[in-house]
């Protein structure tokens, strides 16, 4: 770590739980962020600023005007640009020392499994159950920690799934075989700052997972009701009959 890095990350290095050794671990880390929307925007910016050495960002969409109310990694000059290109420009400008790898198509199947197997953590910032379930399966197969978030209207939720631990529940344990709900941000709206809050929590949990510090949200679901500014924490147990994680662990 050179003098410029010591200065850039000084406020983190001062923290007893991080220090120089922890900062170096962040610089050496590779994280996969899937989704460059309302959640992926703030979480990727904070991971970049904190010095995570390589961010692999994934999104297949282009920037639209309606995105800019909450997707703060993009700006008006990014309209009609691939989201990963727009986000990559912002993240590199924020911290030119990190590497940003851009994937401008949806990941699935063996390609998703391969990418998940090459990172220290996966952050799910997608907006549909089909993608979340597939990401969950890939992380489970590769024993890669998964930091999951979701937001709609003025509500949000975050959890961490630690597949390196045999007693960890998976995303399927939480939702089962739920069908894609008709409620989406496009039809029900979302307050941009609520996406920011949830994305920031995802970034914080990712750093904690990378450094193995503190108590993460593993085995817990953190729920935010921003309209009344109330938080709830619910314990999550592994479903012994889960067709995804129970079958793989047996």
Image (cartoon, grey):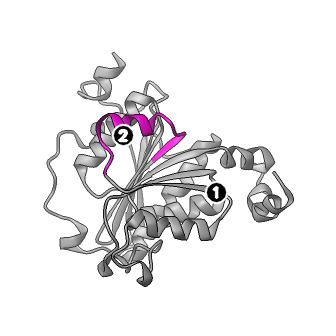
Which residue corresponds to the image point at 46% horizontal and 33% vertical from the top-left? 117
Q: Which residue is mark 2?
A: 112
Up-down: is 164 above or below 37?
A: above
Residue found at the very far top of the displayed protein: 250
Could you tell which of marks 1 and 2 lies nearer the N-terminus? 1
Mark 1 and mark 2 residues within 8 Å of each other at the beta carbon: no
Which residue corresponds to the image point at 43% horizontal and 27% vertical from the top-left? 167
Which residue corresponds to the image point at 29% horizontal and 58% vertical from the top-left? 127
Image-based side of 50 in relation to 235, left or right: right
* Residue 91 image-quadrant placement: bottom right
Q: Which residue is mark 1?
A: 98
* Residue 112 image-quadrant placement: top left
Label 1 Cα crowd, 10 Å radius (few <14 / some 14-19 / many 20+): many
Residue 214 in view in this figure = yes
Residue numbers of the magenta segment: 106-122
Q: Is residue 64 magenta?
A: no
Q: CA distance from mark 1 to mark 2?
A: 22 Å
Q: Nearer the viewer, residue 31 or 86?
A: 86
Q: Nearer the viewer, residue 86 or 14?
A: 86
Which residue corresponds to the image point at 34% horizontal and 73% vertical from the top-left? 63
Q: Nearer the viewer, residue 63 or 175?
A: 63
Q: Position of residue 191 (x, y in %)?
A: 35, 76
């Amino acid at each position: 770590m050179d003098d410029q890095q010591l200065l850039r990350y000084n406020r983190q290095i001062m923290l007893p739980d991080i220090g120089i050794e922890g900062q170096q671990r962040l610089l050496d880390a590779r994280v996969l962020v899937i989704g460059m929307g309302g959640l992926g925007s703030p979480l990727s910016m904070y991971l970049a600023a904190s010095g995570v050495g390589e961010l692999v960002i994934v999104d297949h969409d282009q920037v639209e005007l309606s995105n800019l109310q909450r997707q703060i990694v993009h700006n008006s000059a990014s309209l009609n640009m691939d989201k990963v290109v727009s986000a990559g420009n912002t993240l590199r400008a924020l911290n030119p020392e990190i590497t940003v790898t851009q994937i401008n198509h949806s990941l699935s199947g063996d390609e998703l499994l391969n990418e998940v197997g090459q990172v220290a953590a996966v952050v799910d910032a997608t907006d549909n159950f089909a993608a979340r379930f597939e990401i969950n399966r890939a992380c489970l197969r590769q024993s890669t920690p998964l930091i999951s978030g979701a937001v709609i209207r003025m509500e949000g939720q975050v959890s961490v799934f630690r597949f390196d631990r045999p007693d960890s529940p998976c995303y399927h344990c939480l939702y089962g075989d739920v069908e894609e709900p008709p409620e989406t941000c496009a039809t029900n709206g979302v307050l941009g700052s609520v996406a920011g809050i949830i994305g920031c929590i995802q970034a914080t949990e990712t750093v904690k997972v990378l450094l193995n510090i503190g108590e993460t949200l593993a085995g817990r679901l953190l729920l935010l009701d921003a309209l009344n500014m109330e938080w709830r924490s619910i314990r999550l147990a592994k479903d012994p009959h889960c067709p995804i994680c129970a079958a793989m662990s047996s």
